[in-house]
Image (cartoon, grey):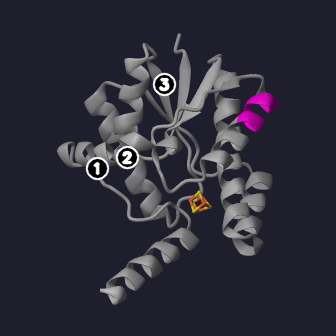
Amino acid sequence: MHGLLLHVCCGPCATVAVPAWRDRGVEPVAWFHNPNIQPAAELERRVESTRRYSRAAGLELLVAERRPEAAVWREWVAALAAATPDQRCAVCLGLRLRAAAAAAARLGVPRFSTTLSVSPYQRHDLIVAAGEAAAAEHGVHFVYLDLRATFRESYAESRRLDLYRQAYCGCAASKWEAWHERTQRKRAG
Ligand code: SF4
């Protein structure tokens, strides 16, 4: 039996998160569920990069439904429309980690974690809060591993394995924000 269900946000982050767990003697089962990613073609690119990495790493990968249940989807769409970026991200992390906790409980895996903790751009306090709330709701344990120090290494691994690497976090708002930041940087010289 697997000792850990690892929610995977994308192939590049998995390239450093999976070895980090293996170094600790844990063989994770990877679980992809990121309905926040827009547009649909981008979601498919990230599913494909995760599949590609899984094949290269000999990792068991489960890809969940692209869409969550209707009530969760409505909560997410409302957060996109009305919330501040932090509130939006809290809902986004919550919906993914609740689903991961539910999947771990269903599969009989006692612990879960997430590759989201690779990114220095994520709010790690929100990841921990969402993970612990989801764990309490589903009777499993959330394990937070701070992997920000490996973020740069994930670039090199992605290049080595020829993985698609995204230019924004996931939702349409983050795509616009990333484009805006790049434009500002170019203008600043
Ligand atoms: S910026 Fe990223 S974490 Fe925040 S809501 Fe968008 S996709 Fe989710």
Q: Are marks 1 and 2 in contact (CB under 8 Å)?
A: yes
Is label 2 within 8 A of ligand 1 (CB to nearest ligand atom)?
no
**Farthest residue, direction top:** 1
Identify which amino acid the numbered label 1 is placed on: Tyr
Q: Nearer the viewer, residue 21 or 152?
A: 152
Where residue 54 sits in the image (x, y, percent)? 34, 33
Where residue 8 sits in the image (x, y, percent)? 49, 40
Q: Is residue 40 left or right of residue 73?
A: left
Please tell me in which quarter of the rendered image ligand 1 is found: bottom right
Where residue 128 sits in the image (x, y, percent)? 66, 40
**Disc 3: CA contacts within 10 A as few (<14), some (14-19) or many (>=20):** many
Q: Secondary structure at mark 1?
A: helix
User: Disc 2 designates what residue?
Assistant: 151
- Residue lying at 66% horizontally and 55% vertically, measured from the top left: 92
Q: Earlier in the sequence, mark 3 or mark 2?
A: 3
Question: Which span of residues is magenta-colored?
Answer: 132-137
Q: Secondary structure at mark 2?
A: helix
Where residue 170 sits in the image (x, y, percent)? 51, 61
> Between marks 1 and 3, how big is the CA–CA gap?
22 Å
